[in-house]
Amino acid sequence: MTAAEAGFSGVEPISVFPDFASIDSVDVKKQQFFDFLEDYVMAENENIAKTRRELGSYLDIANSGLDFSQRERRWILQLAEHYDLDTATLSDREITNELYKRVDKVPVSLALAQAANESAWGTSRFAREGNNIFGQWCYEEGCGLVPRRRLAGATHEVKKFDSIQESVNAYINNINTHPSYSYLRDLRARMRDRNRPLDPLRLAIGLKSYSQRGDNYVDEVQNLIEQNQLTERDKG
């Protein structure tokens, strides 16, 4: 259920990361980095919002106690597979309600702050050579770039992506599926239940496991959001 699969073409994919390191002015570099990346985050968020709206009708069916048709159940199970949800022991109602927690957008402000932190404003080796702006790892030999300071015995690489959109999509999917971010998803669901806008500063608390820096990492992300007034870029 990626943006491409949904036919959403808000931005054209590119294969080479812009040369942000060549921009001397820090303020200009920050602004151009945020402006550039925002479109990609919004594209995938729009795709997710479309899927979530469709999922809402399935949620109504499941919570009413009615059974899904074969076609409806097939759609739900395909979505569950995409969102790494183990359905073996879950009822249709449990599957649908858990999916409704996962199929949701990540605030633009939160994504931009993490991208700035993880990619050093788009100047890191992994951003420039691998389109990896969120520091995501992979574990198969040759799947990415080997960190120069990787500890002896470690096998991880920093994943390479073919485009910026692919990197953004993988990041959002990671937030929406990985067990480490279940608390973030719970916080987001509570905000939705109360009809409140998504609060990126509170959601950032759920990113403690994203980095070995833990609470310090959360503070860094929150500070980036506040110092750069990134909430002004959030829409719903």
Image (cartoon, rainbow, N blue to C red):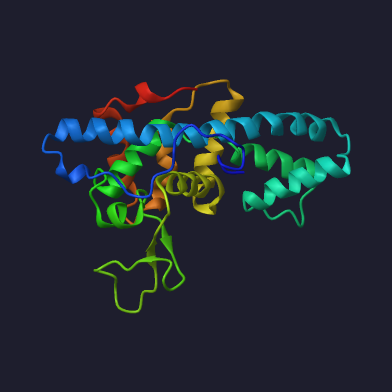
126 lies left or right of 53: left
What residue is drawn where x is 33% and y is 43%? 115
199 lies left or right of 47: left
What residue is drawn where x is 53% and y is 52%? 178
The quadrant in which residue 141 appears is bottom left
What residue is drawn where x is 60% and y is 41%? 102
60 lies left or right of 146: right
What residue is drawn where x is 60% and y is 38%? 103
The quadrant in which residue 203 appears is top left
Total number of numbered discs in the rendering: 0
The quadrant in which residue 185 appears is top right
85 lies left or right of 160: right
Q: Where does the image place residue 31, in percent across and percent down from the top left?
A: 24, 30
Against 106, is 198 above or below? Answer: above
Regarding residue 216, the answer to whether it shows in the image is: no
Q: Residue furthest left?
A: 24
Q: Where does the image place residue 97, in percent across and percent down from the top left?
A: 70, 38
Regarding residue 75, the answer to whether it shows in the image is: yes
Against 174, is 219 above or below? Answer: above
- Quadrant assignment for the N terminus: top right
Q: Where does the image place residue 154, in percent across and percent down from the top left?
A: 36, 74
